[in-house]
Image: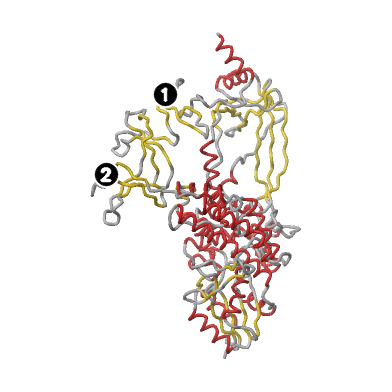
Amino acid sequence: MANNLVIVESAAKVTTISKFLGKSYKVEASLGHVRDLPKSQLGIDVDNNYEPKYITIRGKGELIQKLRKEAKNAKCIYLATDPDREGEAIAWHLYFALRLEGKTVKRITFNEITETAVKEALKHPRNINLDLVDAQQARRILDRLVGYKISPILWKKIRKGLSAGRVQSVTLRLICDREKEITEFIEQEYWSIETLFKMGKTKGFEAKLEKIDGKKFELQNQAHTQQIIDECVNNPFIVTKFKTGEKVRNSPLPFTTSTMQQESAKQLGYSTQKTMNIAQQLYEGIKIGKEQVGIVSYIRTDSTRVSQSAVAMAKDYIINKFGEHYLKENKKSSKKSNQNIQDAHEAIRPTYIDQTPESLKEYLSRDQYRLYNLIYNRFLASQMKEAVFQTHSIKIENGRYTFGASYQKEKFDGFLRVYKDDDDERNSKEITVKEGEQLTLIKIDKNQHFTKPKSRYQEASLVKTLEENGVGRPSTYAPTITTLLARGYITKEQKILYPTDLGEIVNNIMLDYFPEVVDVEFTAQLEKILDEIATGNIEWKEIIKAFYPNFAKTVQKAEDEITNIDITEVTNIPCEKCGTNLIVRYSKYGKFFGCPNFPECTFSKPWFEPIGVKCPLCDGEVILKKSKKGRIYYGCENNADEKCEFMSWQRPTGDKCPNCGGILVEKGKNKKIVCANETCNYGKENKNESKESKANKNASKNN
C-alpha cells in the first residue's frame, strides 16, 4: 500500500518515476497549473494592494478531487513539479488547491528523469521557495495588467481578437524596427580587388587589396578600380611579411534553451516551437524496449553549469573512445556574460552518455533523432579539448598597394571531432611562401559590391536578439513568436519574419501611447527586478505598485484619444457573384477583396491598389500588391494573365534612368530616386564622396 504521494506536472513522467520508486510511492500528475487568474476578468484587485484572485482552472475540478483523495490517505506528499519558477508556483498552488495545510508536504526537484536523480531528490527535500513563487506571481500579474488593459483598446479601436503583451509587444517592435531600417536603407556602391597567385602545384592562393599608401581606402567606382589594376599588373608582387602562428578555438558551452533553439534553427531548420516540443518529448521520456526513459536533462534553463557526475561520465567516455589527449584540461566552471541566470539549473545534456544517438536511432522519430544528436554532440564537445589551427598571415607589396591574406590549417581537431558545421571548412589552406619572394600572378579581378542593410529576422536571430537584450526568458520565446504569427502581426516567408500591415498598425499605437511597455531597456530592467524578487531582495508587490499607477493613466489617455481605426475599406469594384461593391478585408496574410455579404456570398480576390504609374514594360497599370506571406511589392496589372513579368520591391516612379535607361524607383524614408539596375550607380553615390570627385563634378558643370 502506497503511503507517499509524489505529484509531477506531466502525465508522461508518471509511469517512468513509478518504476523508480516502487510500491510505497504513488505518482500522480497535476497536468500543469491547477489554479490561475480568471479569464473573464482582470483578477487583480488594484484597490486592495494588488491582491490576485486565483480560481480553479476550468476542467481541473475532477482531477483536484482525485488528488485531494490521494493526499488525504498519504503520510507524506512530495511536490515534484518542474525545477523552475513556474514549477515552484505550481507546487504552491497545489498546496492550497489540495488543502494540504497540516499535512507533511515536501518540495523536491530533479534536473533529469533518471532513477539516480529522482532518488537523490527524495533524500534532499525542502520547503516551497516562496521567493521563486513571488517572482512568478509578479511576472504573471505584470503580464495580466498589460494584456488585459491594452488588448480591449485594440479590440475597440481596430477589431476583435487582437492582443498586446509585455514581451510580445517588444518582440513585435524589434521586427517592425528592422523592417523600417531595411525599407529606408539606401545602398552605396563599392569595389574590391582580388588576386590569385601561383603556389607550387596547388591551385594557388588568393589575396585582397587592403591598403593604398599604407592607409585603408574606399574604392567607389569602376574607373578608379581599373586604374589600380592597370598599375599593379606592371609591377612585381613581393612578399614583405609572412607570419605563422597558432590559434586555439575553444570548445563550445553546452546548450541553454536559447542556444539550443538557435542551433536547431541553423543546423536543422526547426522553428523554436518545434524545437521545444521535441525537446520536451526527449526530457519526459522515450520508449526504449519496455522502459520509458528520459534521455535529456531539463530543457528550460539559462545555465551552462554541468554536474560533477555528468562531467565524470563524459570524461570516461571521451578517454575510452578518443583517447586522453582529447579530454579538456583545467576545466573551470562556466559563466555567462549576461547575468540572467534563472535558478541553479544545469545545461541541457544527455542523461546517459553511453546512450549514443546511433544506439537510440531505432527508438526515435527522425526529428527526435536529429535534435538528440545535436544535444548529445554539443555536450560531448563541451567536455573535449580545444581545436588548434596553424595560421598563416601574408602581406604582399606592389608599389603603393598592399595585398593581404589569412589562412589556417587544422593542426588538432579536438572537439571538432564530434561537433562542427559547414563554416568550419572555410579558408582552410596551408601556405608555403617566403619573405622577399616574388609571386607569380595568375589573375587579378575587380568586383562590384553594394552595401546591404541588416538582414530581416529569422526565428534564430530573433531569439538571439531577445536574449542579448534581456527581454523575456528563453522558455517564453517560442510561444511569443507563435502568438505574433497567430494574431497576424507578423508572417513567415522562407523562414524570414516580416511585419504585416496589421502588425505595423498595432506597433504604431504601442509606440505612440505605451512607449515604456515596448521599450527594450525597460523590459530588460523588469527582468532584472524579477531576478531580485527571486533572490528575496525585493518584495514582489513593490514592482506592481511602481508600475501600475502611471500605466493606468496612460491606458485612460489611450482610451480617450485613439480614434477608431476602420481597416475595412469600401471599393468601387463589383462582386463577380452578387454585384455588391467589394470591401478590403484583413486576414493574417494581409489585405484581400471580399464581399460584404459574407457568409451568404463567399467571393474574394487578391488585393491590389493602382499607384498611378504606367508599367515600363507593357504600358499597363502598376499596382501595389502583397505576396501570400504579406510582403508589399509592385507589379503590372497584366501579371495575372502572364502577359507581363514586371515586378519591383521598390515603388517605381514611371521615369527611366538617364544613365542606363533602366527603371527609377523610390528608396528610403526620404524617397530618394535611384536606379533599380544594380550595375548602375545613378542615385547611389557614396555620402563620403571625395573632395576630388566633387571638384571634378563642379568643373564639369562650369564647363
Viewport quadrant of the C terminus: top right
Q: Position of residue 377 (x, y in %)?
A: 60, 59
- Looking at the image, can residue 112 be seen? no
Q: Position of residue 394 (x, y in %)?
A: 69, 32
Provide the secondary structure element on which disc 2 rests. Answer: strand
Name the residue beneath numbered marker 2: 574
Name the residue beneath numbered marker 1: 656
Instruction: First in sequence, mark 2 or 1: give its number.
Output: 2
Instruction: State how far apart marks 2 and 1 are (Cα).
Output: 35 Å
Looking at this rendering, what residue extends furthest in the top direction?
703
Give the residue type at disc 1: Lys
Is 507 drawn above or below residue 140 in the view shown? Answer: above
Which quarter of the figure has residue 146?
Answer: bottom right
Q: Give neighbour class at mark 1: few <14, some 14-19, many 20+ (Cα, 10 Å).
A: some
Of residue 294 and residue 539, the one placed in the foreground of this image is: 539
- Looking at the image, can residue 245 be seen? yes
Looking at this rendering, what residue extends furthest in the front direction?
560
Of residue 43 and residue 481, the one placed in the foreground of this image is: 43
